[in-house]
Image: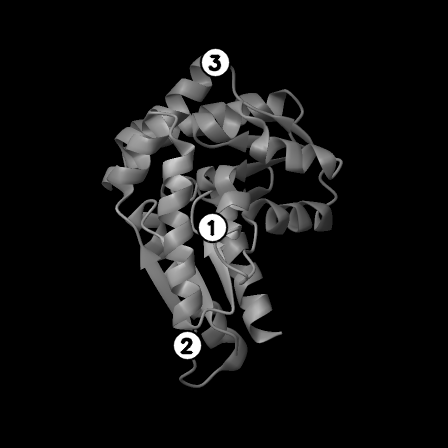
Amino acid sequence: MKTIGLLGGMSWESTVTYYQQINTLVSQRLGGAHSAKLLIASVDFDEIEKCQAANDWAKSAEILGQAAHGLALAGADFILIGANTMHKVFDEIQAYTDVPLLHIADATIARLKQHHITQVGLLGTKYTLQEDFYKQRLIQAGINVLIPDAAGVDDVNRIIFQELVLSQKRPASKAALLQQIAQLQARGAQGIILGCTELDLLVQPADVAIPVFDTTLIHSQAAVDRALS
């Protein structure tokens, strides 16, 4: 079994999900008392969030790059960035280590293609929705991306940063997310990407009439596939 390195803490809520999902999957596949070989470098999300707000992506890349280097020194065979938004600095983090990083969007694209999805709705932070670093990867794979309108982007971003990363799970916010999903479906989305690793704290596949692609789970599954290959 290969050793998985996880850059976590963005937020710690989703890092808990990664830990649970990865270990559950390893246990299911190997049986017995097996669990994952897993190293976690959990950063202070307040520091990362302030870098985001200040548009200081170079500083956030330095923080995560140094953490990735530490995971490599500790014996990680490959590394996950446990946050969709911070894939904006994927290449900069990768430059800190020769240990490969497993991109969350690439794992998601593979799953979309398995389901023959050509047009997908995307929910996430305003950075993920408004900038090209994530959407363009999907578009280059032949998948059209739909996002909420400007008010919807702001509302989803608010729910993520003012509630979910603070462990607040409000029924009204779940209803708001489901309304955004319904609007994306009405515009032609064949499926929905939960493109923030906290969104699965509120939205589950059973809540939605079309396929839901939970990036936290997909990333975890891709990691276990590689660890056990």
Q: What amino acid type should be assigned to the residue bearing mark 2?
A: Ser
Q: Tag 1 or tag 3, which sits nearer the N-term?
A: 3
Residue 87 vertical placement versus 120 (above, below): below
Label 2 environment density (alpha carbons within 10 Å; few <14, some 14–19, many ≥20)? some
Q: Would residue 54 be found to the left or right of residue 26 on screen?
A: left
Tag of residue 216: 1
Tag of residue 81: none
Q: Tag 3 or tag 2, which sits nearer the N-term?
A: 2
Q: Where is residue 217 in the image (x, y as percent from the top left)?
A: 49, 54
Can residue 20 be seen here? The reply is no
Q: Mark 3 points at which residue?
A: 150
Q: What amino acid type should be assigned to the residue bearing mark 1?
A: Thr
Please tell me whether mark 1 sits on a helix, a strand or a loop: helix
Identify the image quadrant of residue 19. bottom left
Identify the image quadrant of residue 125. top left
Residue 23 vertical placement versus 144 (above, below): below
Which residue is located at x 54 percent, y 53 percent? 218
Q: What amino acid type should be assigned to the residue bearing mark 3?
A: Ala
Which residue is located at x 48 percent, y 53 percent? 96
Q: Where is residue 229 in the image (x, y as percent from the top left)?
A: 62, 74
Q: Position of residue 13 (x, y in %)?
A: 30, 49
Please tell me whether mark 3 sits on a helix, a strand or a loop: helix
Q: Residue furthest bottom?
A: 32
Q: Name the residue under label 2.
A: 35
Pick the front one: 205 or 59: 59
Pick the front one: 7 or 62: 62
Pick the front one: 13 or 73: 73
Pick the front one: 46 or 63: 63
Q: Distance between the residues labelled 3 and 1?
A: 25 Å
